Amino acid sequence: MNKQAIGIIGLGLMGQAFGKIFNSGGFSTLGFDIDPKRCSEFGQSSTTSSALKLAEQCHTLVLCLFDSHQIRDVLLGSHGLLASGRTNPLNIICTSTCEPDEIAEIAAQCKAYPVRFLEMPISGTSKQVADGEGLGLMGGDKQLIEDLSPILDAMCKKRMYVGEIGSASKAKLAINLVLGLHRAALAEGLVFGSRIGLDPNILLNLLQNSAASSSVMRVKGPMMAKREFDNPQSRVDQSLKDFGLIQKLALEQKQPLPLASQYVDLLQSCLEKGEGKKDNAIILEAIRRQGESA
């Protein structure tokens, strides 16, 4: 496969991270986002004025969009990439965390066009992705995965095949459920330790060297200990979106998720405080505020 420019649609945290690792891997990139500020951050000379123009110049597109509704609109909407009856081949790598049945339906509709669709949500924050530490969860055709391997290698060295399209989103949501609860547990432990007189930085170091250690402590612990959340790696509103999907699937299976419900309530309180764009480690403040109001 030649190193033709890779197109990135959605230049938020993940889109920016993929741009960096593609460039460091020898690929050129073109990006598009409806937000001019994000295009400016990506570099005006490296962006196009529309998704259609991006698709005209790139045979492989990486979608880093918020949800399946945006993906459907970009691909199949009235002004979508496929609305005009595309005839040139196109590879789609969808990295968004989506409702599993919806992303499977979108991929099925793409089969009516010369489009090959790979589902690959990423487990890891945008910083972990930029550092090459993300895990790609793959759903779709194995031949496509092999054909795109040079691009996928650049995106994330660690990848696992889950199954048909939709299965990778299911796996990502299950992982995110556990991750979210890990964050809440760490935040609660740090707030508890602070209340009883422990220095949060010392406590964090102790936790990282104890039986309670986890990767969450390494990634989110310093933010919590310093109470600095303004440079997000993963945002409150994104976590709430994912947990909405988790709760929807759980309800369909009649499976209560009592800890997840408490987690959602805590993040919802952050959203109501205007903290939706902050790093989701700010759940620590939601727990802290409960103690101050008691």
Image: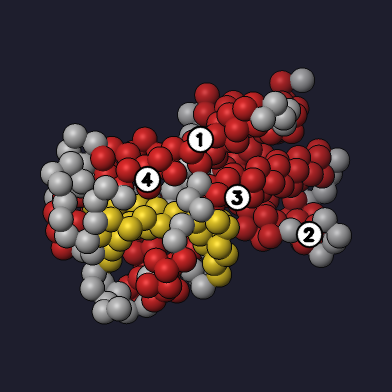
Crowding at mark 4 (Cα within 10 Å: few <14, some 14-19, many 20+) = few
Mark-to-mark CA distance, 2 and 1: 27 Å
Residue beneath disc 4: 108
Relative to 86, is 194 on the left or the right? right
Of 17 and 195, nearer the camera is: 17
Mark-to-mark CA distance, 3 and 2: 23 Å
Residue beneath disc 1: 241
Residue 8: image location, x then y, percent = 30, 57
Mark-to-mark CA distance, 3 and 4: 20 Å
* Callout 3: SS: helix
Q: Amino acid at mark 3?
A: Ala
Of 59 and 16, nearer the camera is: 59
Discs 3/1, front: 3
Of 79 and 273, nearer the camera is: 79
Residue shown at 75% from the left, 43% from the top:
185
N-terminal-most mark, 3 or 1: 3
Residue shown at 35% from the left, 52% from the top:
63
Point out which mark residue 213 bears: 2
Discs 3/2, front: 3
Q: Amino acid at mark 4?
A: Ala
Residue 268: image location, x then y, percent = 57, 27
Residue beneath disc 3: 171
Crowding at mark 2 (Cα within 10 Å: few <14, some 14-19, many 20+) = some
* Callout 4: SS: helix
Residue 166 seen in the figure? yes
Relative to 292, is 165 on the left or the right? left
Residue 248: image location, x then y, percent = 58, 29
Discs 1/4, front: 4
Crowding at mark 3 (Cα within 10 Å: few <14, some 14-19, many 20+) = some
Above or below — where is 236 with respect to 20? above
